[in-house]
Image (cartoon, rainbow, N blue to C red):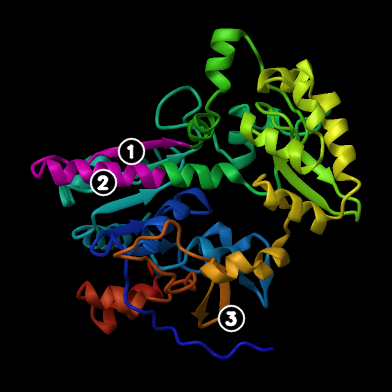
Amino acid sequence: MKPSPASSASPAATGPLVGLRILDMSTVVAGPFAATLLADLGADVIKVELPGKGDPLRELAPHKNGVPLWWKVTNRNKKGISLDLRKPDGMALLARLLADRDVLIENFRSGTLDQWGITREWLQAINPRLTILRVTGFGQTGPYRDRPGFARIFEAMSGFTRMCGEEGGSPLHLGYPISDAIGGLFGAVGVLSALYRLKEEPAARGQEIDCSMTEAMLRTLDFLAIEYDQLGVIRTASGNRSQYAAPGNIYATGDGKWASIAASTQSIFVRLCAALELEGLLADLRFRDNPSRVKNRDVLDAIVGGAIAKLTLAELRVKFEAHEVGFSPIYDAADIFADPHFIARGTIVSVADPELGNVRMQCVVPRFSETPGAVRSAGPSIGQHNDEIYTALGLTPEEIIRLRGIGII
């Protein structure tokens, strides 16, 4: 069914961050994702793009009728303006925009803004309490600070990619740039932490936040460094098997479907054995505890996989739910949209968009009992809110026309 036309007006912001004002000058995924997480919770975010060309994320698939779909989610809940801040007139407008903003988010290569004259000193001369989040691949210091970066590089350097893939096979990249999302999460946490300090210290100067996506990805791999430091162990790929608990794998059911199962504690293993009528495993010394099961996981996987292969997915669900064993079918996007739990919780929400009509995307995470956030709008078109934002700055219609004519906005 063709979507109905949608208004460009957005509902009023709700959420615990209403009143927080952010200028997002970042591009592609990690920086914009950090800003959008805060926008989802009520922050007023202005997204800045170059006139005409816009954010490179617009070029990435998928598209519908030339409209970039990824963009619509990564930059939702923002107002979009165009501004060439490399030019004097653009810098002048940037200064006016920053005067009442709390946070600036950027992810240019380290030192790029400094070369344009947009230094920390310049920024905080305008707004001394401005918090500046800088999201880069390798950080603001160190021998790699000037290197260009992409998600796959950060994932490879963090050790993550080496842990993915089949045992004995080549390392494997995931089908989504997960390090961009991880870096964005750490960036958003950094912003909130810096703002809390300013709340507690009213006379404090705003600070810079140096968020390296490679370091964020490495931090996510909790045990990787300490295991090597203390045991000399280097983690490599193990296929779909859990590297720290057994049984934990993806198993084929008798009707040709797939289920992901993890028995990460002793009590769950006991319940799994009961569900699959494999109680005899509990007396086997090879499987007496989790370290023993991990050591003998090849044998254990063959036994568990053989039992599961005799059941349909529906039969397996009944048995595991009765014994409280955690498992999930391997979902695709259609399964997510149809799942009754996701439907009941409103995990996929609909939002009006002037370019595409009504579009559906993920809900706001996490949920707040008293001040819930909301998806108010999908990502804006290039310069969609130029007139609104620049008029609010005090520019006349004639000035806006002039700046548009010379490519500043």
Rendered image quadrant of residue 41? bottom left
- Gap in Å between the C-alphas at discs 2 and 1? 8 Å
Judged from the image, the secondary structure of the residue bearing numbered disc 2 is strand
Asked if residue 400 is positioned above or below residue 139 in the image, the reply reads: below
Magenta highlight on residue 184 = no
- Counting residues from the start of the chain, the first of labels 2 and 3 encountered is 2
Q: Identity of the amino acid at label 1?
A: Ile
x and y, in percent, of residue 182 in the image: 51, 43
Task: Say which residue label 1 marks.
Answer: 209
Residue 164 shows up from this direction: yes
Q: Residue at x 17, y 51 (%)?
A: 127
x and y, in percent, of residue 260 in the image: 73, 45
Task: Say which residue label 3 marks.
Answer: 356
Q: Residue furthest left?
A: 203
Q: Identity of the amino acid at label 3?
A: Leu
User: Residue 136 vs residue 208: left or right?
Assistant: right
Front residue of 311/327: it is 311
Q: Residue at x 28, y 42 (%)?
A: 193
Circle 3: is it few (<14), some (14-19), or many (20+) Cα within 10 Å? some
Front residue of 326/174: it is 326
User: Residue 238 vs residue 187: left or right?
Assistant: right
Magenta highlight on residue 197 = yes
Q: Residue at x 44, y 23 (%)?
A: 142
Judged from the image, the secondary structure of the residue bearing numbered disc 1 is strand
Circle 2: is it few (<14), some (14-19), or many (20+) Cα within 10 Å? many
x and y, in percent, of residue 57 in the image: 57, 58
In the rendered image, the quadrant that contains the C terminus is: bottom left
Task: Say which residue label 2 marks.
Answer: 131
